[in-house]
Amino acid sequence: MMRYTLEVEKYGIYCDGTEAATTTAGFNQALKNASEAGICEIDIPRGIYLINGVNEESALKPEERAGIIVPSNMTLNLHPEAEFRVAPNGSFGYTCFYIGEVENVTLRGGKIRGERYQHDFNGHGDFEKKETHEWGYGINIHGSRNVTIKGVDIADCTGDCIMVNAQGMLNVSWTTYRPARNITIKDCKLDGARRNNISVTGGEDVKIENNEITNAGINDGCMPMFGIDIEGYGEGDIDYEEPRNVKITNNTFAGNVAQSVCNFSGYEVVISGNHSDNTISYGYGTDTNIENNIFVRKDKKYTAIAGLGVSAGFIGNNATISGNTIKGFSSGIDVRGADVTVSDNTISELSVDGIALATFEAKNVKFSDNTVNHCQGKLCCARNSRDITFEGNELNDSDITAMEIIDSTNVKAKSNDIKRSKQGVVITRSSAKVIDNDVDLTEYTNAAAYAIAFDKGSDVFIKDNRIPTPTNMAIYGESVEGRTVRIKDNDITDAKCLIPIYVIGGKKHEISGNDITFNRTASGGYGIQTKNTDGALIQENIVHSVSGFKLYSPIKTDESINSRVIGNKISGNLALNKTDIETNNIPI
């Protein structure tokens, strides 16, 4: 492979930051000559090079075929003290290095500086005016393949530091679609672009690794202001560009205004091993993995991991969120859309106003084996969602509630370990199964509320939960006719409260197989109490005191009607209504 050191004087290239037009033309002539001569690697010496980044022959796309135009089969080695500065202009688009419809290109080292802070945002020259002026790029990879950008320092562009995009459009008859393919961006410093530091709109097999990606959108930037934006253009369920198979690994994100990474509409995206101080989102993306990232803030702002919904024409996101560590944000993981699994994440020190694990307008979501500590706000919340599972999570230290289920359908809370929180599970206007959980509120420093509670608008199945030493009601709920309440086989031990299980209202509830022991320091208490219910079945429960103090009554149904109190093992006398059926109860 032939290698050549660029002869700047030969081509009229100025190294002192002047004469943009002459310098740009000199570079392009030098690269053209080298390519025709079979030279595949060029070393560019130190210097300050002023570049005309505007294609003045294109009124609609001045950023295309502009600036330094890199040919195929070319490696450019930029000296560490080679700095390329885009000449100040008033165009809505420009490019410093254009890698367009070529192949086998490497750009290595050096610095690229946009003219963001010298740009004339009121100007547009002879071009069609686009008021946002967001198409100014440091490097424009346009419909090319086999491109590597390595160790380049890029900053201060009016648009993006690096744009990866397609030539032409999908699903139209008048153009050929050529996405950028096999693109690698690594070991770069990308800072302070006005819009995004990297955009991938029409690219396939894109690898973004080991970069420092900082401050996108600062100083009154232009939306969306992401560190990395993966966003193809489409309308409804028709894609005109597709970002596909993008891997974002081991990067550092800091100070990007809106988000660190957003997979707004990409396919097969992996976001792994990064360090982030802002949101990473699967957006409307499909087949996204967000795994083993570290999220750290100190001001308890923003959501660490988020989503937006399901892309038009698809049934789900198929997103996996696993192994992430989140600390010091407002909220942890906010799931929207469908078909999402969230597992083995560790979340701590969130805002009291935030939620560690949440869904909103989501369906078919499973949260499993996550650990939440030292978070004062809600630890889990399913809201306006359906088919949601919280399983095997360790949930600790809430001053509000460990789990809230509100306006949702078919929510399952199974085998979770809840400790040191004010409340365990609160169910509002929802259908929920609460099964096999440990709800231990004994170490909560203030007065604890209910271990499990539900309202009149809910259908509940509460089974096999373990609730030690409740100082307030272990299971409390209100119901109405037409709602289902089943409370079975729960183990409530050493109760200090007056009423471990209390249900008000509704019809034909089942309260069976529960084991309730009292360990009070004074006489009194009702093991199971109903009020204003009709036809409740209270069967095969065990209610007794392990201290020397007697209960008022183990089962109290005298404020309800038609209760069936059958086969319970009890200490003390039943308090029944005259309409009740009582049989086979055994004193102990």
Image (spheres, rainbow, N blue to C red):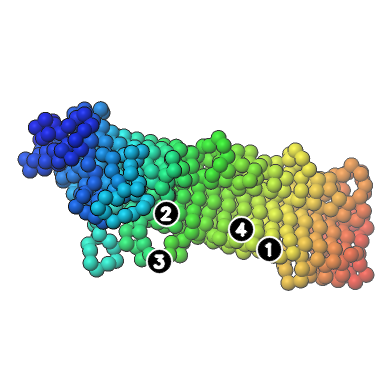
Q: Is residue 436 above or below residue 193?
A: below
- Viewer-proximal residue, 172 or 105? 172
Q: Position of residue 126 (x, y in %)?
A: 25, 53
Measure the alpha-carbon separation of dots 1 and 2.
32 Å
Q: Which residue is mark 3?
A: 236
Tell me the kind of residue under disc 4.
Answer: Arg
Question: Which residue is depicted at the point 84% across and 45% down?
Answer: 496
Secondary element at tag 3: loop
Q: Sequence order check: which comes first, mark 1 or mark 2?
A: 2
Q: Sequence order check: which comes first, mark 4 or mark 3?
A: 3
Q: Residues within 10 Å of mark 3 (few under 14, many from 20)?
A: few
> In screen coordinates, is 50 left or right of 553?
left
Measure the alpha-carbon separation of dots 4 and 2.
23 Å
Tell me the kind of residue under disc 3.
Answer: Gly
Of the two numbered discs 3 and 1 in the rendering, the one whose residue sits closer to the viewer: 3
Measure the alpha-carbon separation of dots 4 and 3.
26 Å
Q: Which residue is mark 4?
A: 383
